[in-house]
């Protein structure tokens, strides 16, 4: 697979004659990581697939707005995160779920997802992640699964590195306590 | 230690995707993207008024200056006319007085009084 040269692609995205081919490279390169980012937020494969399509569609529609001030990956992650959060808010409103009741809804999403075949401990981990508030869930997924640097997460979420470290620390504590309690049961 | 719990879990989240999903993803995404409208910026046509505007403004400015100059000269001329008219009035007044004195036998005292008032 050809090396992804972000500077070259960013330059090509600015020109109408090379824009579509460059965007094709973007989809090839970022399709998988963006999918997992979204999937870990919404749990369901079908929802994640729809949101990924929307993410790329929005990026394509607004490609003229991308001036290369931020990294391409940061810009795309930002769109994906916004899409995921908007989707979860809509779901919450449509199903009249309160913030307290969201945990149960997200847990049921994990259990009913036909594309989940983890063992018990992985299931507990997913349940623990889904029981986190949105912001903690986002930070935990980016740090734990994607192994992103705090600085990059800070660019995407617009939160200070210090606040992100604290958020991650709290998320880890909650997850560990949840898994421990499930293991004891 | 607590840290060990997460370290011991396989980072594969247990979530799966349908077979061939990522292989087909690129084509599906690209197929759904609308064609971009390529906007070529053409310079807007220049109207006659746009071209003539600076010349019209300049002409108006010169006309204004000329008009002001004309008004100034006319006003100055008017002042000197008024002075001339005043002088003529004095001359006429003297002539009338002389005629009056000649035809009406005015006394010397009245003449002195008139001259004293005039000074």
Image: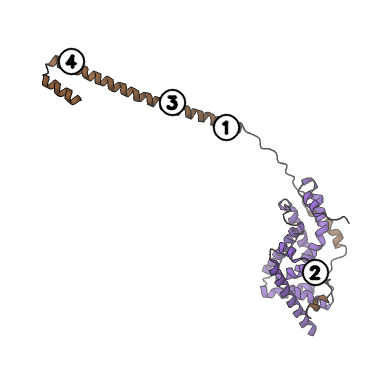
- Do marks 3 and 4 both belong to one polypeptide chain? yes
Q: Chain of mark 1?
A: B
* Chain for numbered disc 3: B
Residue at x-position 15% and y-position 17%: B101
Check disc 1 and report its element: helix, strand or loop: helix
Q: Earlier in the sequence, mark 1 or mark 3?
A: 1
**Would you identify the image quadrant in which residue A97 lies?**
bottom right
Please identify the residue farthest to the bottom as the structure is shown.
Answer: A184
Q: What subunit carries mark 4?
A: B
Tell me, for residue B54, which label it has, or none: 1
Distance, label 1 to label 2, CA atoms, is: 67 Å
Vertical relation: A34 (above or below) B71: below
> Which residue is label 3 attached to?
B70
State the SS at label 4: helix
Q: CA distance from mark 3 to mark 4?
A: 43 Å
Q: Colour of chain A?
A: purple
Q: Considering only vertical position in the picture, is A128 above or below B21? A: below
Instruction: Give me the C-alpha separation between circle 4 and circle 1.
Output: 66 Å
Tell me which chain appears brown.
B
- Say above or below: A77 vs A173: above
Question: What is the crowding at mark 3: few (fewer than 14 residues within 10 Å), some, or many (at least 20)?
Answer: few
Circle 4 sits on which residue? B99
User: Disc 2 to disc 4, how far (Cα)?
Assistant: 127 Å
Q: Which mark is residue B3?
A: none
Q: Which residue is mark 2?
A: A145
Marks 3 and 2 close (CB-CB < 8 Å): no
Q: Residue B97, position in %: x, y?
A: 18, 18
Which residue is painted at 75% across and 56% down in the image?
Answer: A57
Mark 2 or 4, which is nearer the eye? 4
Mark 2 near mark 4, Cβ–Cβ under 8 Å?
no
Secondary structure beneath dot 3 equals helix
Q: Position of residue B35 (x, y in %)?
A: 77, 49
């Amino acid at each position: 697979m050809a090396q992804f040269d972000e500077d070259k692609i960013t330059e090509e995205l600015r020109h109408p004659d090379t824009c579509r081919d460059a965007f094709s490279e973007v989809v090839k390169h970022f399709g998988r990581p963006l999918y997992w980012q979204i999937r870990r937020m919404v749990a369901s494969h079908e929802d994640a697939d729809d949101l990924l399509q929307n993410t790329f569609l929005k990026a394509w529609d607004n490609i003229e707005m991308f001036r290369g001030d931020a990294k391409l990956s940061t810009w795309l992650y930002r769109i994906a995160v916004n899409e995921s959060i908007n989707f979860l808010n809509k779901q919450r409103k449509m199903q009249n779920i309160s913030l307290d009741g969201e945990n149960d809804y997200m847990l049921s999403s994990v259990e009913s997802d036909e594309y989940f075949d983890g063992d018990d401990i992985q299931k507990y981990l997913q349940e623990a992640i889904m029981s986190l508030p949105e912001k903690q869930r986002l930070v935990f997924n980016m740090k734990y699964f994607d192994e992103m640097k705090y600085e990059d997460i800070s660019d995407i979420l617009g939160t200070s590195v210090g606040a992100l470290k604290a958020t991650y620390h709290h998320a880890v504590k909650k997850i560990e306590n949840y898994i421990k309690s499930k293991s004891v049961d | 230690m607590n840290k060990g719990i997460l370290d011991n879990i396989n980072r594969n989240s247990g979530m799966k995707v349908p077979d061939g999903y990522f292989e087909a993803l690129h084509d599906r995404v690209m197929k759904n993207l609308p064609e971009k409208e390529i906007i070529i910026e053409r310079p807007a046509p220049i109207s006659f008024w746009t071209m003539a505007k600076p010349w019209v403004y300049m002409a108006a400015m010169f006309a204004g200056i000329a008009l002001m100059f004309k008004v100034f000269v006319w006003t100055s001329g008017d002042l000197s006319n008024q002075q001339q008219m005043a002088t003529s009035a004095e001359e006429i007044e003297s002539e009338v007085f002389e005629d009056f004195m000649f035809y009406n036998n005015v006394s010397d005292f009245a003449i002195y009084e008139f001259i004293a008032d005039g000074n």
